[in-house]
Image (cartoon, rainbow, N blue to C red):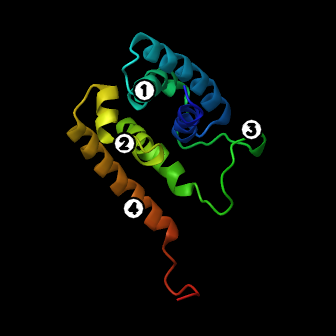
């Protein structure tokens, strides 16, 4: 596994869980699964192995996660740039379906192609595009609700 793949797995679980400790624990497990998949099938693309491994570990952890209730701290080492508002993401993480949440993370945060996501999950790329479109509409509406200035607010 490369440093980039390791970081991608860690980011996947950070944004999926919004829980520092569970993200670190799950990422460690997913790394093991990903390495094992690559060892069994050296021809497997790293991004396909990453999707399959993160989905496997997600399935094992999802029942233990309180979506929409972040559990993060500065001491954990996760650095969010100053001025970044995770409010819309927290709301999306809480209200989105599992398929929508995971697809947005793989596609838009980790920049994995629709074809690699579909291969990693064993579903069609059309299904991935449908889930992504539906999810992005939700994220967009949540971000608009946060960023819209109130009527009559200064700065217009």
Of callouts 4 and 1, which one flags the residue occurring earlier in the amino acid sequence? 1
Of callouts 4 and 2, which one flags the residue occurring earlier in the amino acid sequence? 2
- Provide residue 51's location: percent of width, then percent of height: 41, 29
* Mark 1–mark 2 CB contact (< 8 Å): no
Q: Is 107 above or below relative to 152?
A: above
Q: Is residue 26 left or right of residue 145?
A: right
* Residue labelled with disc 4: 141
Label 1 vs label 2, nearer the camera: 1
Of callouts 1 and 3, which one flags the residue occurring earlier in the amino acid sequence? 1
* Mark 4–mark 1 CB contact (< 8 Å): no
* Residue labelled with disc 2: 100
* Residue labelled with disc 3: 76
* Real-space CA distance between mark 4 and mark 2, rounded to the nearest whole angstrom: 14 Å
Q: Quadrant of residue 42?
A: top left
Q: Is 39 above or below relative to 66?
A: above
* Real-space CA distance between mark 1 and mark 3, rounded to the nearest whole angstrom: 24 Å
């Amino acid at each position: 596994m490369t440093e980039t793949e390791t970081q991608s797995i860690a980011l996947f679980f950070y944004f999926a869980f919004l829980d520092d400790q569970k993200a670190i624990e799950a990422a460690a497990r997913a790394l093991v699964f990903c390495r094992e998949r690559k060892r069994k099938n050296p021809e497997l693309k790293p991004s396909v192995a990453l999707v399959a491994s993160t989905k496997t570990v997600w399935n094992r952890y999802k029942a233990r996660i309180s979506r929409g209730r972040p559990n993060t701290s500065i001491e954990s080492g996760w650095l969010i740039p100053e001025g970044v508002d995770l409010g819309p993401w927290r709301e999306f993480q809480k209200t989105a379906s599992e398929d929508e949440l995971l697809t947005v993370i793989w596609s838009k945060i980790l920049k994995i192609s629709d074809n690699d996501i579909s291969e990693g999950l064993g579903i069609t790329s059309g299904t991935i595009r449908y889930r992504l479109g539906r999810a992005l509409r939700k994220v967009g509406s949540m971000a608009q609700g946060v960023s819209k200035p109130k009527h009559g607010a200064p700065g217009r």
